[in-house]
């Protein structure tokens, strides 16, 4: 009988890998649509505001995950409303929401009297704080998000590359804009416990940035993004376990290292390709 690897003999690591795999798939998938629509900063805004919900949950001694989800969804709704008001200055809506969320979070930190350890786990993630209730909520929401992405893949694809064309084709653009922001808010709330409020948005963009260097089609970019997201989570969690490192930071740093390796590899490949073409022309 094959013995289970040491890292999987601990219940908290089993939970961390389950949540991490969900996050590793969902973050790059949703991040693809955000990055291609020039909305990559939305993740940062929603992740900072979700911290307010987490602090409210701690203040009232209730599981912080539902509060983080509620605040993220509420923020997504307000964000789209502000984007419609400031159509020519969309980034202003992000600054307004982020300023309000961070201001409220700082006030709640003082009221909740959060310990340094508790605050660190909120900001940078802590796999030790994952409960069975959190795992159940995250699993249900993750499957729900994946079903929505799969069911409306065509609409999101159309909306990403030609919003006006999608409108003319009869696609309810505003409704799908809200849905994309709600899915972003949901995946950020799911990843808070394992990656942290300040780092979760990185998984929305960094794997996508690496995939864009390799791919020539939307489908290829999506697949590479998910592969890089999963690799970041698996390598990051494994490294954090064996080297006693912060899991959130290790996961994000792993994704950045993957990006740098891909960038270097493409540069080397381009260099030798051009050199080979040049030598062929000289002959």
Image (cartoon, rainbow, N blue to C red):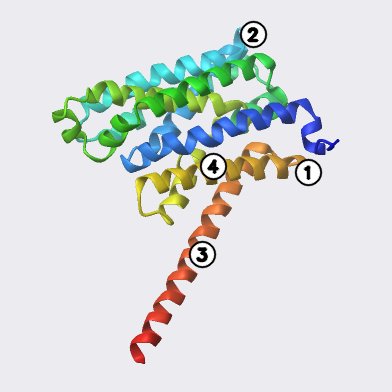
Which mark sits nearer the N-terminus, 2 or 3?
Answer: 2
Rounded to the nearest whole Å, what is the CA distance between mark 2 and mark 4? 33 Å
Counting labels gives 4
Which mark sits nearer the N-terminus, 3 or 1?
Answer: 1
Rounded to the nearest whole Å, what is the CA distance between mark 1 and mark 2? 32 Å
Kindly identify which residue carries mark 2: 61
Q: Residues within 10 Å of mark 3 (few under 14, many from 20)?
A: some
59 and 257: which is toward the camera: 257
Q: Are marks 2 and 4 in contact (CB under 8 Å)?
A: no
Q: Position of residue 9 (x, y in %)?
A: 81, 31
Front of the two marks 2 and 3: 3
Say which element carries label 3. helix
Q: Position of residue 49 (x, y in %)?
A: 46, 24
Say which element carries label 4. helix
Say the numbered circle drawn on residue 265.
Answer: 3
Q: Are marks 2 and 3 in contact (CB under 8 Å)?
A: no
Which mark sits nearer the N-terminus, 1 or 2?
Answer: 2
Vertical position of residue 249 compared to residue 83: above or below: below
Q: Residues within 10 Å of mark 4 (few under 14, many from 20)?
A: many
Say the numbered circle drawn on residue 242.
Answer: 1
Q: Residues within 10 Å of mark 2 (few under 14, many from 20)?
A: few
Tell me which residue sits at (67%, 37%) in the image.
247
Is residue 206 shown to the viewer in this render? no
46 and 259: which is toward the camera: 259
Residue that protrudes farthest toward the left in the picture? 168
Which mark sits nearer the N-terminus, 2 or 4?
Answer: 2
Q: Position of residue 218 (x, y in %)?
A: 36, 45
């Amino acid at each position: 009988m094959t013995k289970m690897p040491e890292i999987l003999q601990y219940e908290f690591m089993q939970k961390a890998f389950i949540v991490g795999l969900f996050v590793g798939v969902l973050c790059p998938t949703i991040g693809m649509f955000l990055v291609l629509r020039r909305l990559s900063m939305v993740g940062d805004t929603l992740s900072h505001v979700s911290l307010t919900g987490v602090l409210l949950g701690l203040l009232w001694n209730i599981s912080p995950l539902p509060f983080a989800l509620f605040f993220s969804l509420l923020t997504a709704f307000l964000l789209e409303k502000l984007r419609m008001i400031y159509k020519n200055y969309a980034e202003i809506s992000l600054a307004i929401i982020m300023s309000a969320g961070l201001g409220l979070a700082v006030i709640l930190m003082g009221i909740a009297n959060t310990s340094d350890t508790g605050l660190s786990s909120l900001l940078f993630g802590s796999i030790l704080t994952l409960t069975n209730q959190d795992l159940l909520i995250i699993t249900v929401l993750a499957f729900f998000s994946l079903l929505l992405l799969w069911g409306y893949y065509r609409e999101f694809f159309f909306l990403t590359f030609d919003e006006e064309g999608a409108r003319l084709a009869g696609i309810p653009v505003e409704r799908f804009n809200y849905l994309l922001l709600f899915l972003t808010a949901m995946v950020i709330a799911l990843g808070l416990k394992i990656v942290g409020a300040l780092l979760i948005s990185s998984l929305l963009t960094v794997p996508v940035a690496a995939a864009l260097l390799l791919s020539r089609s939307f489908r290829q970019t999506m697949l590479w993004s998910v592969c890089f997201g999963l690799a970041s989570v698996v390598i990051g969690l494994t490294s954090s376990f064996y080297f006693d490192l912060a899991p959130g930071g290790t996961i994000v740093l792993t994704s950045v290292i993957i990006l740098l390796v891909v960038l270097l590899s493409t540069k080397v490949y381009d260099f030798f390709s051009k050199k080979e073409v040049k030598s062929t022309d000289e002959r």
